[in-house]
Image (tube, rainbow, N blue to C red):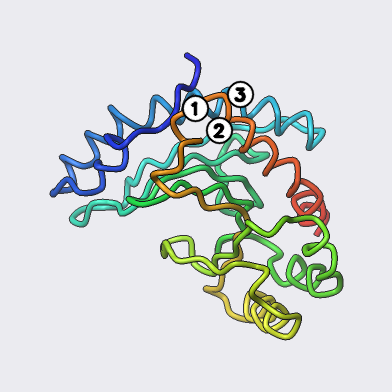
Amino acid sequence: MSFTGFNAHDFETFSIEGLDERMEAIRERIQPKFRSIGEHLCGDAALLAGQEMFLHIAKHARRTVNPPKDTWLAIGPSKRGYKSLPHFQVGLFDDHVFIWLAFIYEVVNKQQIATNMLADTDQLRELVSADYVISLDHMNKQAHALQDWDDAQLHTMLTRFRDVKSAEWLVGRHIAADDPILRDGTAFMELVKDTVTTLMPLYKQALKA
């Protein structure tokens, strides 16, 4: 199935009350689109990374009461899971789509990954364009525009990622729910591929750690 885009109905999923009811809508409305995106993205990412990549779709299996505020797919180098490794994410909150290179708190060797980033923060600034953002918590929808941080702030945040066990680091793009590109499946997939291509040097550097 080819990806045809996201629509208002998809974002309305996150206004549905109740865990079971919202999860049913996620499975029916969003996860088929994730599978379509993932089928294409795995191939593109594998070619760029020079290794096989695997699709994982969030199941939210640990939730027993509160419905999820977001949902996502992940592309990573292991068939068994993705959380302990650098990976790419595409997902939705109620007001935007995110495309991330993600280092969440479970990632192994996060101290070395952060140390490598701290040693070459210029690489990050040279790679990404003005519309890229940073998140310090994958469960929080808020993000920081990289261009708004000076070198001292960037160093402080990376140091926190290195030294605080629960700290996370995600870099990528936010696309507002009303952005027309989300209605155009082909254009959106090109944006995702462009984002993954841009961030691939950081992904490869992290894997070496």
The local secondary structure at tag 3 comes to: helix
Q: From this view, report whether residue 175 is shown above or below residue 149.
A: above
Q: Earlier in the sequence, mark 1 or mark 3?
A: 3
Tell me which amino acid carries mark 3: His
Tell me which amino acid carries mark 2: Phe
Q: Image point 32% across, 45% down: which residue?
A: 61
Q: Residue 81, located in which quarter of the rendered image?
A: top right
Is 110 on the left-hand or right-hand side of 60? right
Closer to the eye: label 1 or 3: 1
Residue 189 position in % (x across, y down): 59, 30
Is 118 on the left-hand or right-hand side of 193? right
Q: Earlier in the sequence, mark 2 or mark 3?
A: 3
The local secondary structure at tag 2 comes to: helix
Q: Residue 170, located in which quarter of the rendered image?
A: bottom right
Give the camera-side residue of 198 and 104.
198
Q: Which residue is mark 3?
A: 40
CA distance for labels 2 and 3: 12 Å
Q: Which residue is mark 2?
A: 188
- Quarter of the C terminus within the rendering: bottom right
How many numbered tags mark residues here? 3
Crowdedness of circle 1 by 10 Å Cα count: few (<14), some, many (20+)? some
